[in-house]
Amino acid sequence: MIGDVLVSSIICNNLRQAYPDAQIDYLVYESTIPVLQGNPNIDNVLLFQERHRKSKREFLNLALEIRSFQYDLVIDAYSKLESWLIVLLSGAKRKISYKKFGRTFLYTDNVPFAEFPKTNLGLAIERRLSLLEPLDLKIEVDPFPKLYVTDKENKDALVHFEHHHLKKDQKTVMISLLGSEKLKTYPLEYMAKVVDYIADNQDVNILFNYFPKQINDAKIVFDACKPSTQEKIYFDLLGNDLRSFIAIMNNCDLIIGNDGGAINMAKALGKSSFIIFSPWIEKKIWATLEDGVHHISVHLNDFKPELLATKTEKELKKNALSLYQEFEPDLFKDKIELFLKQNL
């Protein structure tokens, strides 16, 4: 997914710093290409497509094509069945991944799979960086994912702002309105209250991030907001595709809302973030760069740990929607106000 591919790109960035003349290729799902465009640390983006998943023959052809490149090093940051088979057939001299039961024979280097973060980088970043440790790189490791936006993309975004009469003298807040699925989406009536908090607290432009197919849910949030809040929302200011969203986000000041690709892209653009996590997602993994100032996140476990304490991940996921109802926005209203004050 978008967040995984973007965070894992830090491996490429640091390899380029250590081996400036190496050929560095990155195998990803086709839909994630936009977050890699313009990255000077990647020579070739190799595509894992739906046909490779559906057809054993197509999958084998991809694996053999990768083998033909005769890589010296393969780093498997995905570590699932599809990548295991590709690693097995790669013929690479050195193969690095996480140490997991039953698959250590696939790799020359098996790195411990950390369970708890050591820094405020978060496990998502720390785990990727751990895959570089066997190489003993003689560099100062850069842990921050990055997105690259062209001048034209920035100019097009500003033209888009002008077309929608965005107020230039005000800061602009992006709302990560919907998660990648319902179980990762903060209840819509609660999200409307969050947007109201923002509008009541600051004179800002407010943009909604949603796909056109999600417009009905977006309208539910909009309609539930107070009239005074609706006046600050530019409901139809959307990008046509992922690259145009990135450019729009690059011209916003911060992002607030559901955990997901939009949040990770905003962070890679150096924007401040306030994340509302789903009750079944582990905050310690994706609360990256958390410093209590520019990056803050909230989780039901922060306020009502007794509701989650005895439940397994499977149980949390099964009960996510009912647990979300316990996660009322008043619980963290003061944190949103602090975040806005510190970043606007």
Image (cartoon, grey):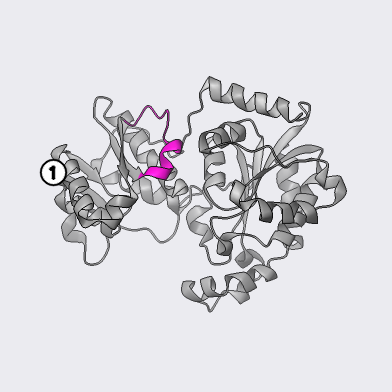
Q: Residue at x 62, y 44 (%)?
A: 273
Q: Position of residue 164 (x, y in %)?
A: 73, 31
| Residue 73, magenta (yes or no) | no
Q: Residue at x 74, y 61 (%)?
A: 189
Q: Is any part of residue 103 visible from this angle?
A: yes
Vertical comparison of 243 with 86: above or below = above
Q: Of the residues shown, which amino acid type is indicated by label 1? A: Lys
What segment carries the magenta color?
29-42
Check disc 1 and report its element: helix, strand or loop.
loop
Quick check: 295 left or right of 144? right
Quick check: 153 left or right of 106? right
Vertical comparison of 102 with 117: above or below = below
Quick check: 233 left or right of 255? right
Q: Residue furthest bottom?
A: 310
| Residue 36, magenta (yes or no) | yes
Q: Residue at x 40, y 30 (%)?
A: 39
The quadrant in which the C terminus is found is top right
Q: Position of residue 67 (x, y in %)?
A: 15, 43
Residue beneath disc 1 = 93
Q: Position of residue 271 (x, y in %)?
A: 60, 37
Q: Residue at x 80, y 51 (%)?
A: 196
Q: Position of residue 95 (x, y in %)?
A: 20, 48
